[in-house]
Image: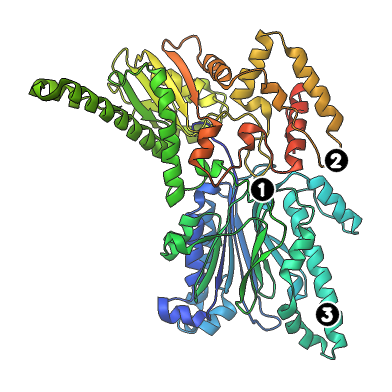
Amino acid sequence: MSDAIKHECGISVIRLLKPLAYYKEKYGTAFYGVNKMYLMMEKQHNRGQDGAGFASIKLDMNAGERYMSRVRSNAQKPIQDIFAQINERINTALTENPSYADDVALQKKHIPYIGEVLLGHVRYGTFGKNSIESVHPFIRQNNWMHRNLIVAGNFNMTNVHELFDNLVQLGQHPKEMADTVTVMEKIGHFLDDAVAKLYKQIKKEGYTKQEASTIIGDRLNVAKILRRAAKNFDGGYAMSGLIGHGDAFVLRDPAGIRPAYYYKDDEIVVVASERPAIQTVFNVAYDKVKELDPGHAIIIKKNGTTAIKEVLEPTERKACSFERIYFSRGSDKEIYQERKELGKLLFPQILKAINNDIKNTVFSYIPNTAETSFFGMVKEAQNYLNKNKEEQILEIGSSITREQLHKILEVRPRIEKVAIKDAKLRTFITQDSSRDDLVAHVYDISYGSVKQGDNLVIIDDSIVRGTTLKKSILRILDRLSPKKIIVVSSAPQIRYPDCYGIDMAKLEDFIAFKAALALHQERETMHLVEDIYKKCLKQVNSQDTDILNYVKEFYAPFTAQEISSKTGELLSSSDIKAEVQIIYQTIENLHQACPKNLGDWYFTGNYPTAGGNRVVNRAFINFFEGKNQRAY
């Protein structure tokens, strides 16, 4: 994706099912869980680079012994910073106390972080400042072990104001109106309530207060707590949590918007945002890693019992398709094939754009994450040429000469690495993004890769704002003197904001929105834009669940091709000599390539929750009123 987008976070839960001494004997270290968590977080680093956090719980500790630990960082390399701090604590303890080296019991008692229940989080901040206070996991502390709660998630709630008001009505006084805080306090409230009721019941059964503590942990119904807490959640989420005595859970939203996968054997239970992270770190086969069903939670009790429970009734599955196009690691077996299919399905449009002239066309990709779609596109170009070659050879027949045969067979797609990102320069420029002259040099070009007068086809994951295309990529590619530059997006036109964890909040940022607005202005239909604004105003504060997305009417007068053509005009500045054409993936092809992940609201406006429609209407109001602010 040439336009940088911050997006959703990554979670990882590891539950060691054996005593720490088991891992010491089998793997040579009691720090097995910590080491695996480091790898899990690094393998999901693509999901979050603003901050990272780690928390652990030690089971069966005595009163007065520390059993919970947490470390967070918003440093430039947060994962490395976290584990440098952890290693320093471990190494210091071992250096100062040599007797700990071979005694796992002493290590567990005196060294932090090496518990049996571990939670990791990598963060992309979609809202607010990237302060350390915003970094997960969050802790809700209490002197009662069962009321301690550690929460981290990959989520965004559209109805944070409603959830906040719910807490106030319950008599709470939340410290801030942030979805992370409100979600944690909501779960915490029902956790408190469940513990209090169990304590009262157990005392009636004749147990002492001290005996009640252990029994509460055994009887705590985590699924019921989550069901009560999540009743009014409106958003996409994979919510992970640890309870002080040792229970752990991960809850997925009813539409399956945010991803969650798990694996279990007799040594560990692990849950993560991405399947290949589990496969690689624990060396397990693809089919051994299961997807957590929408509306369900995986619950790991303190005694190691693991169960999948339906917490909320699943709705129509709308798993995020952007996961497949860009956000998730391309090493996933299904995602790799889907991205190749996305490239393949674009080829007919490309062929039409170059007037079937493959011989005088160069194919390339920007950025590196578009490489897999590029492979699919090139393979389809090869299939097309092979068919043509076959027809030519059959037409000539047995009289074909060696020279004719060679001329036919030598035609193949021309593949070049046309542009190379200068990562160091980009890092420097982010400190002052207004310096357009520097931005124009974010990419270097491979001189000689394109002949003057060639067509140049560049495939990208998606075109969101188009800023980098206009200010950098198109200008520098134009120096190669192509006749035509065709920029191909493996994703459809991004028309609507996301409100479930991806940082795409403002309509006016999208180049597709700007193109549609320009068409309204050209065709003198701005009165329709004002009508949409008035419709949005009427229902913006409505509590009705039957909210409509009126912003669809903004795009309705124009075909997808008209918006694509106008996008090409807006991105092609007057100093670019080559003709510029933009090709987008179709919605139909997206669904064909990614049949299990049909969440497409950023392309179609079909939001899976009522909160999504509220957000898009609010975003339009903000645009119309000139308010440069988020809609949620």
Residue found at x 68% / y 13%: 520
Q: Which residue is mark 3?
A: 199
SS of the residue at dot 2? loop
- How many neighbours does mark 3 have within 10 angstroms: few (below 14), some (14-19), or many (20 or more)? some
Q: Which residue is mark 2?
A: 544
Amino acid at circle 1: Glu
- How many neighbours does mark 2 have within 10 angstroms: few (below 14), some (14-19), or many (20 or more)? few
Q: Is residue 455 left or right of residue 566?
A: left
Q: Position of residue 7 (x, y in %)?
A: 59, 42
**What is the tally of numbered marks visible in this picture?**
3
Q: Quadrant of residue 378?
A: top left
Determine whether 572 is above or below 109 in the image.
above
Q: Is residue 412 left or right of residue 55?
A: left
Q: CA distance from mark 3 to mark 2?
A: 39 Å
Amino acid at circle 3: Tyr
Which colouring convention does the figure follow?
A: rainbow
Determine whether 277 is above or below 620 in the image.
below
Whether residue 368 appears in this view of the structure is no
Nearest to viewer (mark 3 / mark 2): 2
> Which of 74 and 298 lies nearest the eye of the viewer?
298
Q: Position of residue 97 (x, y in %)?
A: 51, 80
Q: CA distance from mark 3 to mark 1?
A: 39 Å
> Which of 440 and 461 lies nearest the eye of the viewer?
461
Q: Which residue is mark 1?
A: 316
Whether residue 450 appears in this view of the structure is yes
> Which of 321 and 424 lies nearest the eye of the viewer?
321
SS of the residue at dot 1? loop
- How many neighbours does mark 1 have within 10 angstroms: few (below 14), some (14-19), or many (20 or more)? few
Q: CA distance from mark 1 to mark 2?
A: 20 Å
Q: Is residue 462 left or right of residue 549?
A: left
Q: Quadrant of residue 158?
A: top right
